[in-house]
Amino acid sequence: MIGTGAVVAQTAPLLAPLNAATGIFQYIWVLIALPLAGAIILLTTGSLLKRWGHIIGVATVGVSAILGIIMLLEMMGRSADDRAFGQTAFTWVFAGQFDVDVAFQLDQLSMVFVLLITIVGTLIHIYSIGYMAHDPDRKRFFGFLNLFIAAMLLLVLADNYLLLYVGWEGVGLASYLLIGFWQYKNSAAAAAKKAFVINRVGDVGLSLAIMLMFVTFGSVTFSSVFANAGEASDSTLTWIGLLLLLAAAGKSAQFPLQAWLLDAMEGPTPVSALIHAATMVTAGVYLIVRSNAIYDRTVFAATAVVVVGVITMIIGAIIGSAKDDIKKALAGSTMSQIGYMVLAAGLGPIGYVFAIFHLLTHGVFKANLFLSAGSVMHGMNNGVNMRRFGALRAAMIITFGAFTAGYLAIIGIPPFSGFYSKDKIIHAAFEQSNIVGIAGVLAAGITGFYMTRMIVMTFFGKARWEDDAHPHESPPVMTIPLIILGFGSAFTGMALVYWGDIETWLTPVTGLEERELAIPTVVLEMLTLATVLVGVGVAIWIYRRSVPIEPPQKVSVLTVAARQNMFDDAINDVVAVRPTWYTARFLVWFDNRAVDGFVNGLAAAVGGVSGRLRRIQTGFTRTYALVMVIGVLAVLTALGLVMLP
Amino acid sequence: MDDVLIAPDIDYLAVAPMIIVGVTAVVGVLVEAFAPRRPRRGIQLVLTFGALIAAFVVLISQAGTRVITGSLAIDGPSLVLQGLILLIAIVSAMLMAERRVDPAGDAFSPRASALPGSEEERVLSTRGFMQTEVWPLMLFAVVGMMLFTAANDLLVMFIALEIMSLPLYLLAGMSRRRRLLSQEAALKYFILGAFSSAFFIFGAAMLYGFSGTISLPGIADALSANPGQTPLIFIGFGLVVIGLLFKVGAVPFHQWVPDVYQGSPSAVTAFMAAAVKVAAFGALLRFLYVAFGGARWDWQPALWIIAIATMLVGSILAITQTDIKRMLAYSSIAQAGFILVGVIAVNPEGVAAVMFYLAAYGFATLGAFAVISLVRQDGGEATHLSNWAGLGKRSPVLALSMSLFMLSFAGIPLTSGFIGKFTVFEAAILADAVPLVIVGVIASIIAAFFYVRVIVLMFFTEPAEVGPTVVLPSVFTTLVLAISVAVTVILGVFPQPVLDLVEQANVFLR
Amino acid sequence: MTEIGTGEAIVFWVCAVLSVTGALGLILSRRTVHSALWLALTMISLAVLYIANAAPFLGMVQIIVYTGAVMMLFLFVLMVVGVDSADSLVETLRGQRVAAILLAVGFGVLLTAGLGSALSGIPMAGLDAANAEYGGNVEGIARLLFSDYIIAFEIVAALLITAALGALVLTHRERWRPKLTQADLMRQRIASGAPGPLPTPGVFARHNAVDTPALLPDGTLAEQSVPAPLRARGDLRPVDIGAVEETRALTEGEAVFGPTVTPVADDPGASPGERS
């Protein structure tokens, strides 16, 4: 890849051995054990504890969050090279040359994830108490949420790829269970299945990558893989990098595996906020950033990461612009924002830090946006069609306030969170390549457009409500998390830059590189902001007047494509689903041919005993024998070809 | 010329576990002949469990034995696999002993000789008759399996194969419910089994023709002494291997599996699926490693193809099944493919991995069939998948256990199946069989789909109006479920002791 | 010793052709009895070959066990089931037969070619040395059986017991209702409405074969006179109409007696409606 400027500063990641976990860090395992215990209690007790289930759910995650904050404070009190801790619970698998421990690694990178997961998780748990108040299965819902939190924490705290894979599968399972939570909706079950299938494709990537690492390095722990990454051949590293990218694309809904995320919005809104916006979908970014030692050594794989990120960033933004379903529009936005992060992660040391930075701010403001949307839905009989919203700002003032904070954050108006993190990524992109940088600016403009469209259609204009809609503000148990997240959307960016010093904090794990840039930073920021404002302006101009209740049919090709999720389903259907289905059908047909032939030919005789007996004697057993003989001949021929010279 | 025949020296202590089970089986037959009908079942239960447990205890006490005695090799793999067979037999015996789930009695026909649907059958059933011969039959099958893993020559291997199979043919046809299906399954199994046995013995004759001996080490010696290629070797090898592959249900010798698994009583299916796989893979390993380990380059390509076909065909066909027993049958075909991957590795890691996998798979299978035996409708089992809709609502504990077994089959981490798959794939990688591993991973991904579909059905679909009932089992099936769940979880989370065990016992005596 | 004598060659070619013919006949004959007899031919030919190859023990066992015991048992069973019962040989699966023949030929070619190339040019070992070692064929086998193959010999016991047990399980029926006393039987017979014995087959008929139904005095057919297995198979010998008419003429006006009288369906002349 062509850099546009000379390197001005460079810090390599610190590959120092992990400190033994002492003091408060002895309790790393408790972070995971608490939500896990909560999940087990909630899922295995029947109608017992039905009234208190949600309290257990919130309490376990909340205590984990407090423990995480204590660990953060303790970690901040130490020097930069003394902040990574390792703890081995027990030897998990030790077979032959293969040795894997159940061991945890808490360093600066995992720390920020722990905080994001537990704090946002706690808030969403609290919010869910209100949101799911009338659901008879609320306890089970909290059980699944807790299971998710535990798996996600395991994912970010694992010290090796195999344990990470455990967490990876765990979050997948929890996500799957939660998308399909409202099982009476057929669409929810279908969405769950789709998410599962597409994620399995990604999982193939991860498991093959782990196998390849084991073959190459003889180990799958982060420390030894990264320490020995330099010794592996380029092609091996590239393959590992591409396979990890496949995994990341599956989990983070990146091109070409993005299709499931839009459908995943069938799940309850807190799930969309927690799993499909703030945490799980960012696991791919975590995986890439964590594997920085591999991507730093393989330009090809890193470039592939950037390409995937850019494509998804644009596609997601376009999809977000065309959806009338508020949650699906937000899902498109999530794709696009994660595209930013993946892009940044692909830039290498220039971008890792900013990928994580944007991930954190996005986790907060997107959770905020989703919960606000959920609050709107709560007041609108669970309607999601923005064409039937409008003028809601008066009816739900707190929700409006929170949504506005998230809106300003995501489009990147200073000093809201998104401004800091997104501009850093665009800046880093320009450091690497002008094309990528321009794509980033463009996507920022589209972001301005679709977010403005969303806020205008929902909160401004004329009321286009359904006849039986009585919009009202949500109960405090929902609005309080909204208020907190609203403030978070506003100030997380600032706090992380000025108080947390996120760059210095993460550098020991990811390394950092800065390059000279032809354009001054201020100009770049102004350019981005101007593009965003253009997007905002266009949206206001289009939607300033009435919004038709029925979606207009005379629209551009791009809009049609975007409404169809960029034809992704159709492509998936042709490329993956149908061939598999046909193969299965063909094999079944082959296997049952004899059966069917028999049944058709002798249908009359099948009923009685004699028919059954004849079927045994002269039925299709002989066909089985025939197939066996074919096998015998094939095996003997194959053996003969190999064995005889 | 008239010298005294010196009695062959046999280490009877080393083969004591087999003798215990075999003698008890004979005693069981005598009980059938002489004991009055009422106490027979009690006596048989005491005999069966007593013999199996005693054999296991003796086996443990002999754990250090490594000896070739007569035509039997008592070495690491055979001891581990025999122990596994005994454990599986104990657990499946519990399943067979269950008498509460079927209102009419146990899982077996009150009289196998009665015509299906006849008045005799009905009357006997209401009077609570039972065919207690199943117990000695089962013990004979166990003897055959144990011999099969230890057989060090082709003749004993063949006889063991028959001792193992014959009782299973019979047991398969003795279901209390859906007897026609059961009898059809038994007859199919018998005919095709006899067909495959013929291949086996034909191949053994060829190998004898080549080497002048039927002992496996003798064949290996003849191979190394006479590396010249003769068709006798590959025809003999091929036919013997085909006989063994039939028993493990590898493609294209798999077609009996779905019919037989579906038709047999669930308790027998569980026993068959779990224990026969152990025994047959034990024999296959011994044959391939001891006799043909040196010629591995010659046979690996053919077995590669079979393993790949087995994994893929099993996984893909399972997707479209609508009967849960049939689905599990195809799943067992796919699992056989995964195990074959470890067999093909031809290294000690492969032996250890295969043994671990067999243990993991065996207990998950026992558990899954135990669950199947509890979901009933109109007296019989409700095996159509649609009947399982919403089971999670009705019986969460049962549905959770079933989910656990399915996740283990699918190889999801923290279950025994995951460690099993990983160790098998690891062994294959060490043997440079990377493409095989890639196909294995892909097949396991496909397979995950139908396993998870069962979970979805149980938890995410609304139960039907008139769904099946989940019967409350007696202590027997409860124990089976508890043991299977425990083994599946423990082998997934703390597999180390078992991994150590199989690793210490991964060398065949020659 | 390593050469094949003329006599031996003749024996070989005769018996080889016979055994293969027997095997083919076994597969191709329609009637089970014929198959069984063909099999016996194969077995005997093989026994002759064994004996000619200096393995008299094996040859005798072959004759005693297979031809003597197993085949006779086979035939016994077939006699009970019905000698001329024939399975339907209509093949319902398209291509099955062609494929089976092709595969069988393929398998045969593979084996023949393989064995032929493997065995050609290999000197004969013969059994003489082996037989001489322990003073004879039987002694040698005994020694092997009780030393090298002792385990195989012992465990076959398990196989045989299983087989016997299996046969019992599949066929044996213990009494499940109280044994009927003579008084019970009498009551049953009276209650059945036909206390007398059934007419035996062939009574008043033109044949006395077992499958010819008896003719009742009124000229109707007594199907029950034919044994149930034959009836179940539909093996009733058709009755000559003329004979029936003749009998009817002889017995015009006689009273009807005996159990239920069923006319043969396709014999309208025997229907009771026309009789009066």
Image (cartoon, rainbow, N blue to C red):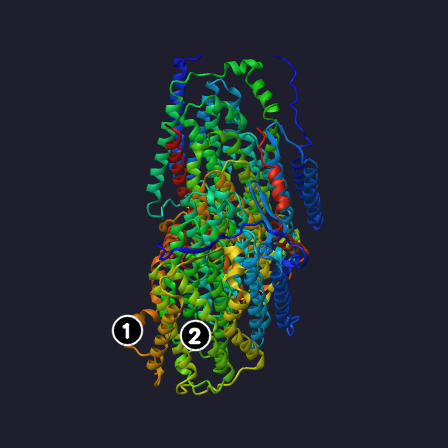
Residue sitting at x 57%, y 28%: B510
Relative image position of residue B326 (x, y in whole percent): 49, 54
Residue C163 visible somewhere in the drawing: yes
The local crowd at label 2, few if under 14, some if 14 to 19, many if 20 or more residues have their Cα within 10 Å, is some
Q: Residues within 10 Å of mark 1 (few under 14, many from 20)?
A: few
- In primary-sequence order, the first of circles 1 and 2 is 2
Dot 2: what SS? loop
User: Relative to A610, is A622 above or below?
Assistant: above
What amino acid is at disc 1? Ser
Q: Is residue C220 visible?
A: no
- Residue picked out by circle 1: A556
Q: Which residue is pictured at 38% across the width and 35% down the height?
A: A638
Q: Nearer the viewer, residue A244 or A144?
A: A244
Type of the residue with mark 2:
Ile
Q: Are marks 1 and 2 in contact (CB under 8 Å)?
A: no
Position of the C terminus of chain A, as image quadrant, is: top left
- The chain identifier of the residue carrying mark 1 reads A
- Residue B256, position in %: x, y? 47, 46
Query: To which residue does mark 2 refer?
Result: A413
Q: Please, is residue B68 above or below residue B353 in the view?
A: above
Q: Are marks 1 and 2 on the same chain?
A: yes
